[in-house]
């Protein structure tokens, strides 16, 4: 199979999958349960999510490993199970993906802040190395460092992946529109700063995920494309901005509402389109219908 960036170079637009965490939470997960432990204890449930995203037409599957660093797993007393939990995450998605789809393993923030001196750079690097090596061993061919706010944390995860694996490495950050109408992460990083910094250290794919619906993301992608004319750009919007209805979090954008904006997102510069929180296999199926298979 060609690498993702090679496929994009031929002019293809790829479809990645949608939400995993929100999808599970709507079902069977109890509050306080470690979602990543389900890779070991309820493998069939996780495999079913992967299978449904394959059926919806995704070219790229993620993995149930967003909170899979030691710093997240230790909150559940699972710091000694980083390797088996992440290896299983990648195995499950690889089995569903088969040889002709990509497995782009999910790596989320550690929740530790360098700025607050919670941890050292070396601590973060080692935590990412441990997780990403296990994802590689389980059969991923790419990794996405996602929902990032801090450029230094993102950089350490990318470097750990580059130093210890041959995986293709994506990094997507989460931006919010400020009162002045600019886009910044919670730590103040602009899309332009992200692109310039991360491409310099050899990231293969950049982009944005979470925090916004597709309409906002069109603007963010446009800014990234301006800063990085030849980069491969991944965009994974939420199904709109969540609203509280009857004590439940509801993501308002229907599959059709998302899909109708896909041409504008591609026009703005996106090469890979998927979804984040609130998106389901039905959203991905609707997005797939807008994009010719590679
Ligand atoms: Zn999200």
Image (cartoon, grey):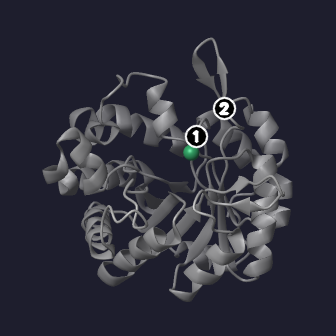
10 Å crowding of disc 2: few (<14), some (14-19), many (20+): some
Q: Which mark is residue 212?
A: none
| Residue 101 appears in the rendering | no
In percent of the image, x 37 and y 57: which residue is there? 112
- Secondary structure beneath dot 2 equals loop
Q: Is residue 146 left or right of residue 48?
A: right
Q: How far is disc 1 from disc 2 in space, using C-alphas?
A: 9 Å
Q: Nearer the viewer, residue 186 or 81?
A: 186
Residue 266's place in the image compared with 93, above or below, is: below
Give the labeled residue for mark 2.
242
The numbered mark, 1 or 2, whose residue comes first in the sequence reads 2
Determine contact: label 1, label 2, CB under 8 Å: yes
Q: Nearer the viewer, mark 1 or mark 2?
A: 2
Residue 14's place in the image compared with 161, above or below, is: above
Check the picture and name the quadrant holding the C terminus. bottom right
Q: Does mark 2's beta carbon lie closer than 8 Å to ligand 1?
A: no
In percent of the image, x 81 and y 36: which residue is there? 257
Give the labeled residue for mark 1.
277
In percent of the image, x 32 and y 67: which residue is there? 128
In percent of the image, x 46 and y 38: which residue is there? 21
Q: Is residue 2 left or right of residue 132?
A: right
Q: Does mark 1's beta carbon lie closer than 8 Å to ligand 1?
A: yes
Residue 71 on image: x %, y %: 28, 54
Q: Quadrant of residue 4?
A: bottom right
- Secondary structure beneath dot 1 equals loop
Residue 287 on image: x %, y %: 72, 46
Q: Nearer the viewer, residue 257 or 148?
A: 148
């Amino acid at each position: 199979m060609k690498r993702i960036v090679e496929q994009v170079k031929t002019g293809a637009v790829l479809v990645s999958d949608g939400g995993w965490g929100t999808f599970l939470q709507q079902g069977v997960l109890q509050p306080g349960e470690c979602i990543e432990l389900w890779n070991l204890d309820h493998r069939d449930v996780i495999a079913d999510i992967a299978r449904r995203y394959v059926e919806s037409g995704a070219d790229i599957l993620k993995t149930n490993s967003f909170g899979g660093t030691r710093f997240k797993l230790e909150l559940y007393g699972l710091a000694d199970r980083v390797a088996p939990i992440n290896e299983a995450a990648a195995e499950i998605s690889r089995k569903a993906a088969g040889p002709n789809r990509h497995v782009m393993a999910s790596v989320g923030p550690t929740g530790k802040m360098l700025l607050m001196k919670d941890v050292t750079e070396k601590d973060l690097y080692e935590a990412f190395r441990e997780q990403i090596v296990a994802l590689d061993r389980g059969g991923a061919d790419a990794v996405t460092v996602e929902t990032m706010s801090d450029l230094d944390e993102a950089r350490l995860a990318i470097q750990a992946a580059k130093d210890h694996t041959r995986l293709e490495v994506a990094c997507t950050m989460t931006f919010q529109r400020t009162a002045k109408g600019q886009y910044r992460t919670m730590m103040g990083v602009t899309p332009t700063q992200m692109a310039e910094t991360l491409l310099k250290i050899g990231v293969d794919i950049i982009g944005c995920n979470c925090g916004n619906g597709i309409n906002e993301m069109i603007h963010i992608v446009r800014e990234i494309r301006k800063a990085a004319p030849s980069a491969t750009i991944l965009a994974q919007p939420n199904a709109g901005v969540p609203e509280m209805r009857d004590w439940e979090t509801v993501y308002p954008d229907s599959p059709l509402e998302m899909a109708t904006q896909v041409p504008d997102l591609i026009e703005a510069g996106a090469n890979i389109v998927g979804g984040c929180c609130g998106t389901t296999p039905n959203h991905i199926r609707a997005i797939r219908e807008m994009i010719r298979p590679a």
